[in-house]
Image (cartoon, helix red, strand yellow):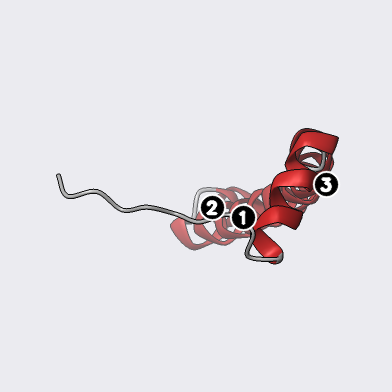
Amino acid sequence: MSLLYQLLTAPIFWAFWTAIFTGLIVWVAYIQLKRINTATRADFIDRFKKDFFKESTRDIMAIIQYEALIFKVRDI
């Protein structure tokens, strides 16, 4: 048998290339997930600002901050 045939059929050869390609796939997946996470954070902050900081919620926050609102606790 030729040396090339022995090399291509060796389990070490295929294990080496499988490990290389697996590492490459993990690296690409990590980069993609990192980008998605950044976009998700930005979207969350944008939605939070849009939904929470409205005029009515600002009034409620000001009332709470100046302790003009009294909370009553009832027994359940």
Residue 17's disc is 1
Q: Secondary structure at mark 1?
A: helix
Q: Residues within 10 Å of mark 3 (few under 14, many from 20)?
A: few
Q: Nearer the viewer, residue 34 or 40?
A: 40
Ranked by sequence position, the earlier of labels 2 and 3 is: 2
Which mark is nearer the camera, 1 or 3? 3
Q: Secondary structure at mark 3?
A: helix
Q: Nearer the viewer, residue 46 or 71?
A: 71
Residue at which label 2 appears: 14
Task: Please state the horizontal and vertical placement of residue 11, each as a whole percent of the image.
Answer: 45, 56
**2 and 1 marks in contact (CB < 8 Å):** yes
- Can the viewer see residue 5? yes
Look at label 2 and name its amino acid: Trp
Query: What's the distance in space between the residues labelled 2 and 3, CA to CA?
Result: 42 Å
Q: Quadrant of residue 47?
A: top right
Query: What's the distance in space between the residues labelled 2 and 1, CA to CA?
Result: 5 Å
Query: What's the distance in space between the residues labelled 1 and 3, CA to CA?
Result: 38 Å
Residue at which label 3 appears: 42
Ranked by sequence position, the earlier of labels 1 and 3 is: 1
